[in-house]
Amino acid sequence: AQKVTQAQTEISVVEKEDVTLDCVYETRDTTYYLFWYKQPPSGELVFLIRRNSFDEQNEISGRYSWNFQKSTSSFNFTITASQVVDSAVYFCVSGYSTLTFGKGTMLLVSP
Amino acid sequence: GAGVSQSPRYKVAKRGQDVALRCDPISGHVSLFWYQQALGQGPEFLTYFQNEAQLDKSGLPSDRFFAERPEGSVSTLKIQRTQQEDSAVYLCASSLPNQPQHFGDGTRLSIL
């Protein structure tokens, strides 16, 4: 069984601020994937990143970066210089084939 | 289009009616998944197909829920004798083997 905890229900920032979304996961599997998906107000789920449980290397993609730490079972997501278009619900997800979603963090970026 | 297509986008039904939700996966994607997303919650897994075989249906909440994918492409999620607690967004996703899932826009089901 897997469990994903996103303790932050809602975060509000002003444009250009940096923001970090926290994620803690639980799993008994030795091989698993971790993901982040974005769900803007329009409703579609947009894939952002997938990390393999064996690869703890952090990743940066433009303004996005991810910090995977197996020792603390965390997979945090940072947006640098946030923009209004980043406003959405962000889901941390774990799984290998079927996915287990956290409850999501709603990010509101105001001008 | 190149994405996962779901229809209808919105469905309103009276309690007790049967409903059928359709999913057209991305062409060539062998894996297909159904999720249920209640308001303000994350999606929850319902069932999973690999080609036409239903490999996991452990997430289906009751025997009123039934899914099929007879030719390994289009899938239908059927809910019989709908109840108010079935109101949710139903999401379909598809993927190539060992690749990330791509989601459709979902069907918003409202049971009156």
Image (cartoon, rainbow, N blue to C red):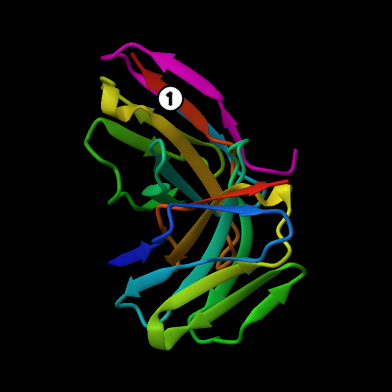
- A102 left or right of A47 in image: left
Amino acid type of disc 1? Leu
In the depicted structure, whether residue A63 falls above or below residue B73: below
Quadrant containing the N terminus of chain B in the rendered view: top right
Q: Is residue B16 magenta?
A: yes
Residue A30 in picture, x, y percent from top left: 37, 83
A85 on left or right of A19: right
- Give the answer, above or below, for where B106 lies relative to A73: above
Name the one closer to the observer, B51 or A65: A65
User: The magenta stretch spans which residues?
Assistant: B1-20
Q: In the rendered image, which quarter contains the C terminus of chain B?
A: top left
* Along the viewing direction, whichever of B52 and B63 lies nearer the viewer: B63
Q: Position of residue A100 (x, y in %)?
A: 39, 59
Q: Is residue A28 above or below residue B5?
A: below
Quarter where residue B96 is shown = bottom right
- Residue drawn at 40 percent across, 71 percent down: A24
Residue at 57 percent across and 69 percent down: it is A77
Q: Is residue A99 left or right of residue A20?
A: left
**Quick one: SS at disc 1?**
strand
- Give how far across and how far down residue B23 sits, in percent: 54, 36
* Residue at the extreme left of the image, as rendered: B63
Q: Residue at x 70, y 76 (%)?
A: A60
Q: Compare residues B15 and A6 and report the one nearer the observer.
A: A6
**From this viewpoint, is residue B51 visible?**
no
Which percent across, then down, holds residue A9? 43, 52
Residue that carries the numbered disc 1 in the rendered image: B109
Residue B41 appearing in the image: yes
> For mark 1, does the 10 Å Cα neighbourhood hold few (<14), some (14 to 19), or many (20 or more) residues?
many
Q: Residue at x 44, y 44 (%)?
A: B34
The chain carrying label 1 is B
- The question of residue A69 being in magenta is answered with no
